Amino acid sequence: MSGMSEMSAVWHPPADLVRRYATGGLDPVQVMSVEAHLARCGGCRTALPYEPEWLAESWERIEDVVDRPWPGLGVRVLCRFGVPEHVAGLLSATPSLSRAWLVAVISVLGFAVGSARVTSGDPDALLAFLVVAPVLPVAGVAMAYGRAVDPAYEMQAATPLSGSRLFLLRAVAVLTVALGLTAGATLLFPGPLGASAAWLLPALALSLGMLVLSGHLPPLLAGSLLAAGWFGAVLICDGVLHDRFLPFQPAAQGLYGVAVLVMLPLVCLRHRRLAPGEHQ
């Protein structure tokens, strides 16, 4: 260890490397290496060619992030509905509530409604909507939290609300938005409301199944398994049982309702177990 200290004391970064460090042209690993040396070497710190313009721009960026006077629009809206500010900040960073996801969901629903209206209530357009609609909330919940989808995962993992509690909070937010958008599309569908609303119970059953499975599997894997199972069941009803609308008939709706009644207490119990202090 002493040999490494002596080596680091003798070595000095080349002038070109220091210049690139001062102008922000190094990758994070090189930045940490140079800064580790600068922390111990007063001569290199003195020789560092800071430029006044670069210092001013750097400070403005820091000041904008650290001293920003107002939170984002999403945080302000959530706070207005009584959500604590620290929770609103974590919810507003939900990956699947980003503009890209919202635009994708609205586009899918808009295409389904548009196709149904253009084809004057064609059963194929209605079936496509009923099959896809229950999967939209599941996809959103699957992308609500996790190392693979959340750019701020490491930072949020250090908070008291990390892990399953944060996932459940985000899942509720995603489900609220996804179900609300899909319900709005249902009202625009031509034909009787009951037929176009047959997606609701399957969506609730799949969403609750997602929350239950997420306690044992990564969210992306749980969502993928549920989506594959749902699409597989639809294909079996069409290709084997020769009834494309069987998953949306009253008997199937009854099964979804039973599944919802069974899984809802499990999700509530899990929430109470994760946050016992909130229910005392």
Image (cartoon, helix red, strand yellow):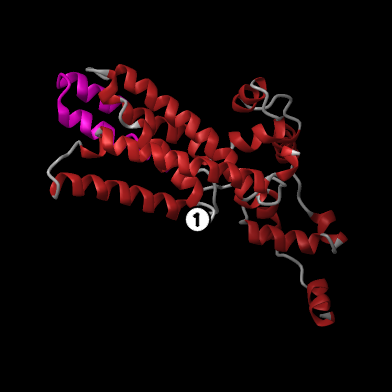
Q: Would residue 142 be seen by someone viewing this image from the given angle?
A: no
Q: Position of residue 44 (x, y in %)?
A: 81, 60
Report the magenta stretch's main SS: helix
User: Can residue 134 be found in the magenta stretch?
Assistant: yes
Res 221 quadrant in image: bottom left
* Residue closer to the observer: 70 or 198: 198
**Magenta-drawn stretch contains 166:** no
Q: Secondary structure at mark 1?
A: loop
> Range of the magenta residues?
110-139
Q: 274 or 138, which lies in front?
A: 274
- Relative side of 221 to 90, left or right: left
* Residue at (65% x, 32% y) in the render: 88
x%, y% of residue 264? 51, 40
Q: Residue furthest bottom?
A: 3
Residue 253 vs 26, above or below: the answer is above
Side of 173 where 114 appears, left or right: left
Three-letter amino acid code at the position of disc 1: Pro
Is residue 172 among what the camera can see? yes
